[in-house]
Image (cartoon, rainbow, N blue to C red):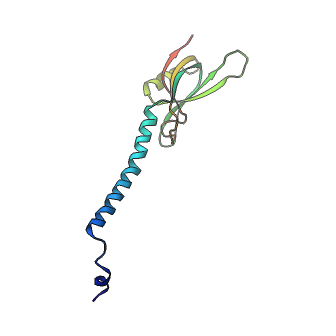
Amino acid sequence: MNARTLLGSGPSSSARGGIRAVLLLGLAVVVLVPVVYMTIVLNWSYSEGERAGVLQKFSRKGWIFKTWEGELAMTTVPGVAPVLWNFSVRDEKVAEALGQAIGTHVAVHYEEHRGIPTSVFGETSYFVNSVRAVE
């Protein structure tokens, strides 16, 4: 008699199948939960609105993933220090329009997406999706 006969032949095929199913389910959860979360966060906006001011800075930033980032100087009374508002842009057409409007007074429509865990999509949670000149 050998040790295998005394101890049994190891796990049955049904036990191995159950372990495999649990591992596959765990892997599916690990992959699907972040994908579903990012889809919801990027497509559902926490808030939206408009802001107006002078477009002070607009540039494309990032080491690997380049994003459009801008800065709007908002003043209510001349002579008072402006409030600086930073924003990101995902749409190339909006980025082109903003690039041509640097130094001018503009109004932008934005959506706020809270909970984005990375700066790959933009450095801020505010994403501008349209721009118009204000006179």
Marks counted in the figure total 0
Residue that appears at 27% across and 65% down: 14
Compared to 77, does 45 lie above or below?
A: below
What is the x, y in percent for residue 81? 71, 22
Residue that appears at 47% across and 40% down: 65
Q: Quadrant of the C terminus?
A: top right
Left or right, 42 with reference to 75: left
Compared to 1, does 33 lie above or below?
A: above
Residue in front for this viewpoint, 5 or 84: 5
For residue 106, what is the image quadrant? top right
Left or right, 8 with reference to 127: left
Q: Quadrant of the N terminus?
A: bottom left
What is the x, y in percent for residue 108? 52, 20
The outermost residue toward the right is 79
The outermost residue toward the top is 135
Left or right, 87 with reference to 26: right
Residue in front for this viewpoint, 128 or 102: 128
Residue in front for this viewpoint, 68 or 77: 77
Residue that appears at 33% across and 63% down: 19
What is the x, y in percent for residue 54? 60, 19
Compared to 57, does 16 lie above or below?
A: below
The outermost residue toward the bottom is 1
Residue that appears at 49% across and 35% down: 67
What is the x, y in percent for residue 85? 61, 27
